[in-house]
Amino acid sequence: MPEFRRKSGTESGAPLTVSALTAALGRTIEGRFGHVVVEGEILSCRRASSGHVYFTLKDPGAQLPAVMWRDAAARLPIQLRDGMKVVVIGKIQVYAPHGKYQLIARTVRESGLGELLLRLHALRKRLTDEGLFDEARKRPLPVIPRAVGVVTAITGAAIRDIVETIQSRYPTRIVIASCHVQGPRAVPSIVRALAQLDRHPDVEVIICGRGGGSMEDLWAFNEEAVVRAIAACETPVVSAVGHESDVLLSDAVADRRAATPTAAAEMVVPRWHDIEAWLGGTLGRLARAMRARLVRAEGRYERQARALPDPRRWVGDRQQQLDELSGRLTHAMSNVLFARTRTQLAVVGRLRSLHPNLRLARAQQRLERARARLVSETARRLSRSRERWDQARQALRLLGPAANLERGYAIVRTADGSVIRRAESAHAGTEIEVILHHGAMDVRVVRTHKSHRFDGEEGR
């Protein structure tokens, strides 16, 4: 609830003054619209003798009074005139004397940049919500860096200003990563240069920027890729774009922001004379502190010296104790040495019996005996296996078909290879094959008999 409503109370309460109501409205409106981007057409533009510029922004439905203070108007790259369509970046303010609100313009650009500035405003809000611009992320700069990295165009005035300023203040090593600072190749070039210097083992602070220019020239430092590359650097980064506008995102994400490249160089290295003065003051304070500590130490020494007994008696007592302890130690060492010698002799005897050469000789003897038994057993088993093999081969030969054929028997098969075991399996006229001990015969059956002359012998 706005402040003026809280203070007004009920309708029967004390009325507000006009000033109080206007002030309450101002706090509410200015707190809600602290940063705005407005597009419209300029009307009634005039420059006062003080240098301030007053104009009105209008569109088909409304008008908005606006003022640009002298410092901001002096930096404008364009001349404002009636009828010009522009995009204004600023904040809303309540002007109490006239009881109206107005736009305090910080920068004005022609309307062609309107959509781009709206996207910039949205990107700023998104990155702010991510916490990329939080002050807690800002890191301190080194007091005296081993080397200063510079990301800028090698041919621009910015690099000359940075080098001259550093060399005049405190000569230190400068590592330059040249890049494009405007145009379509600027963004990837700046990102690569930042990554290169961030990996450099000696660079302890990086200056990233360029000289001044129009918003279009400086736009690369508003791109998300450049902003995230600065945020990702482990090395502290100083943004040094030569401008006074508050819309560049590289300024917001960097650890420090400098108005110009020269100011950035002054920020990262101290003056030599300032260091000498600081060292002189520090050495003076150190000398005074050391003298005070020496005085206190001398006082403690004197007090402790008075409290100490006669050192000669103390030394005599300690010498007597040392003699007694030395005798006891000599006796104890003799006993220990005798016991250790006896133990060592016993260990040496056991070690000799366990000498590897002796154990190896015994193992070789066992190996030779085992090898002889293995050869003998292998020969015996091989002989028995050969005998069983010969017996099995002879039995197989006697039981095989070849042996039966050799005794005068024959194998009778049909044309398709089936063995004929019964006479009724073959009819008169059937062609059969008769296999003998040597060779075979093709025979045609004339007739068959149901019995043969060996039938009567089966029962004998």
Image (cartoon, rainbow, N blue to C red):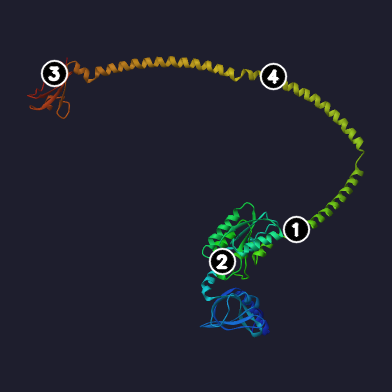
Q: Nearer the viewer, mark 1 or mark 2?
A: 1
Q: Which residue is mark 1?
A: 275
Specify whether residue 267 is in view: no
Which sits in the foreground, 428 or 363? 363
The three-letter amino acid code for the residue at tag 2 is Asn
Instruction: Tell whether label 3 touches label 2 (CB within 8 Å).
Output: no
Badge 1 element: helix
User: Which circle's residue, 3 or 4, is located before the other in the chain?
Assistant: 4
* Mark 3 or mark 4, whichever is nearer to me: 4
Q: CA distance from mark 3 to mark 1?
A: 137 Å
Disc 4 target residue = 345
Residue at 78 percent of width and 23 percent of height: 334
Q: Quadrant of residue 209?
A: bottom right
Q: Badge 4, how many Cα within 10 Å: few under 14, some, many 20+?
A: few
Amino acid bearing label 1:
Ile
Q: Residue at x 90, y 36 (%)?
A: 314
The residue depicted at 14 percent of the width and 28 percent of the height is 415
Q: Amino acid at mark 4?
A: Leu
Drawn side of residue 284 relative to residue 79, left or right: right
Q: Earlier in the sequence, mark 1 or mark 2?
A: 2
Rendering quarter of residue 166: bottom right
Sequence-first tag of 4 and 1? 1
Say what amino acid the circle numbered 3 marks: Asp
Q: Earlier in the sequence, mark 3 or mark 1?
A: 1
- Residue indicated by mark 2: 222
Residue under numbered circle 3: 455
Quadrant of res 172 = bottom right
